[in-house]
Amino acid sequence: MTEIDEVGRAAEPCGRPGGLARKRGGGLPAVGALAAATFTVVTSEMLPVGLLTPMGGELGISDGTAGLTLTATGLVAAVAAPLLTLLIGRRDRRLVLVALMGLLAVANLLAAYATDVVVLLAARVLVGLGMGGVWAIAAGLVVRLVPERRVASATALVFSGVAAASVLGVPAGTFIGELGGWRAAFVAMAAVCGVVAVALGVLLPPLPAAGAVRLGGVLGLFRGAAVRTGLLLVVLLVTGHFAAYTYVRPVLEDVSGAGAGQIGALLLAFGVAGMAGNFAAGAGAARTPRGTLLLICGVLAGAVLLVPLLGRGAGTLGAAALVAVWGLAYGGVSVGTQTWLMAAAPGAREAASALFVAVFNGAIALGALAGGRAADGWGASGVMWLGGALALAALVTASVGRGPGE
């Protein structure tokens, strides 16, 4: 018999989630497959960042309008995450993840053959569906795949897929776009989705849910003050980051004078630093979520605000240094805020993950939209001022808000 916990999700019957799953598989290969899945969904989501200029030029749209491809993806993912978590019920999470990866492959192929912005936006809607589902499921599975003592490091590994998307995915997409055009980058991404779908099917153990997540369980999490603080941090940090980062290519071109061939290298610097920031934040957040996020907020705000102040005078090398510090700070945002929320709602991991993904992707959409308006109205520097101001607001929130266990 199982018991229904306070958020409406059936408790796992084997003492802790996933005890049975690990007997049939799991461990590092399975966690690696989840990391590959997060890498794939984030690369699919962020691919337009490095292709914004050529996409807009061929389709005859402004940078701000091209940025709506990120807005559409984020909005759909924000809605899809909790809804898909509710709809899949007790279905095997392994099979659901494989199906969602297949959907992402189709979406990227559709984007590659888009003839106008309407078709491109339709493709990005499908990316949002796949992305929201994968994130909502994958983030809560780590505890079912590894022993308790390894959960923190395994969670950091899964979230390393986010930073790896910046290190490898977005720069590689930008490079492919320079060689074969932006459409070739989407075709390559579709192929990667297919490979990851196979890896998930082979490496993950069967992962049926012991109980379905219910709508009341997800909404009930808002009663926790620490959960509300964590979600507000997600909104401020992610909105601020994407308001600026969505338009990082035109910013680097206009403010720092970076050429088209240098953009990929600058994004690579961002991603390499982000990988380091992810693992550092994962270790730090396991000990002190508040202290880790205070550091992240402060460094992120400083780096973003210095881009318009120092970028032009410092040249490409100075821009590279600022972008690397920016990446170091933002690399820890996903794992830092996820760790905060998991600690704030330890009895409702999958429900908390669904809520986290919904808010995170809603913030991505809001950031891309706000950044687009700032870019069109205030120019390249405007998006940096907006992003930095929101990071400062997050710093205040992390300082005064209720934390896990308080």
Image (spheres, grey):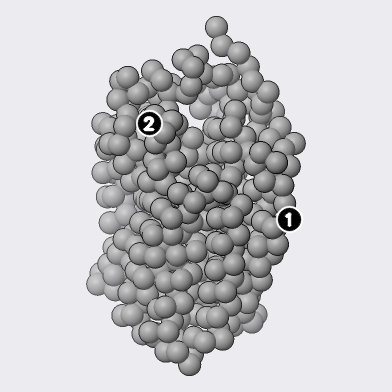
Depth check: 181 or 141 in front? Answer: 141
The image shows residue 36 at horizontal and vertical percentages of 33, 46
Residue wearing tag 1: 400
Relative to residue 55, is residue 369 drawn left or right?
Answer: right
Three-letter code for the amino acid on which mark 1 is drawn: Val
Question: Quarter holding the C terminus?
Answer: top right
The image shows residue 133 at horizontal and vertical percentages of 49, 39
Q: Is residue 312 above or below residue 369?
A: below
The secondary element bearing badge 1 is classed as helix
- Badge 2, how many Cα within 10 Å: few under 14, some, many 20+? many
Depth check: 232 or 355 in front? Answer: 232
Q: Residue at x 66, y 56 (%)?
A: 398
Give me the disc on residue 146: 2
Q: Is residue 197 above or below residue 186?
A: above
Which residue in the rendered view is the most extreme toward the front?
A: 287
Give the image quarter of residue 58: bottom left
Question: Quarter holding the N terminus?
Answer: top right
The image shows residue 382 at horizontal and vertical percentages of 62, 79
Q: Is residue 21 above or below residue 30?
A: above
